[in-house]
Amino acid sequence: MILRMSRTVLRATEITVELPPEQAMELFTPEGERRWADGWDPQYPQADRREGRGVVFTTDHGGHQTTWVMVDHGPESVRYARVTPGMTAGTVAVDLVGSGGHSARVRVTYDLTALSSAGESWLDAFDADYDTAIGDWCTEIAAALQRP
């Protein structure tokens, strides 16, 4: 799915994770993502609150700090609101859409809106690279699953 309006990008794609669904979904939590996403280092303003609905964390990537809020977390989905001040705001969702014993099919959906002209430029680059970036997730996850 691709929707591109002047200041908004909505992109969704599906990937397969070679784990049972519950374990696969865990990889898309703030701490679970540390296992496979190079450079992913969430910081928590409340250090003892790292999971569940309402968790707040920040990430720093490409010189931009993003604040994330987990707005929903269940066995088949996780959803985040995210704001990069002066750049973009929106949501990210990962939903279980199918499973086959030891694998899970998930849909990753980004719905982001630019907050500035710099944000529009960033969104253009994000949109152009989306399929490659999500494809890289598959490679990174598979490599992480091979590590002890």
Image (cartoon, grey):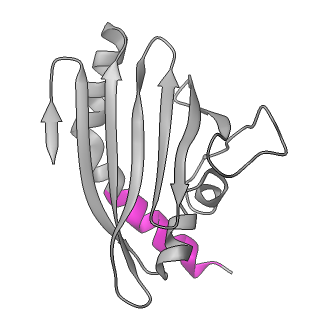
Q: Nearer the viewer, residue 117 or 45?
A: 45
Predominant secondary structure, magenta span: helix
Residue 41 sits in quarter: top right
For the point 28% across and 17% down, the residue is 120
Please tell me which residue is depicted at 28% across the width and 44% down the height of the picture: 130
x then y, percent, for residue 38: 57, 52
The answer to whether one can see residue 24 in this image is yes
Above or below 46: residue 83: above
| Residue found at x 23% / y 18% | 7
The quarter of the image holding the C terminus is bottom right
The residue positioned 41% from the left and 91% from the top of the image is 101
Q: Position of residue 15 (x, y in %)?
A: 32, 66
Residue found farthest to the right: 48
- How many marks overall? 0
Frontmost residue, 94 versus 148: 94
* Residue 138 forms part of the magenta stretch: yes
Residue 102 falls inside the magenta stretch: no
Magenta range is 135-147
Above or below: residue 110 compared with residue 15: above
Rendered location of residue 27, percent (x, y): 55, 64
In the drawing, does residue 73 fall left or right of residue 34?
left
Residue 88 is left or right of residue 80, and the answer is left
Nearest the eye: 110 or 64: 110
Q: Is residue 122 visible?
A: no
The answer to whether 32 appears left or right of 83 in the picture is: right
Task: Tell me where residue 3 sits by quadrant.
Answer: top left
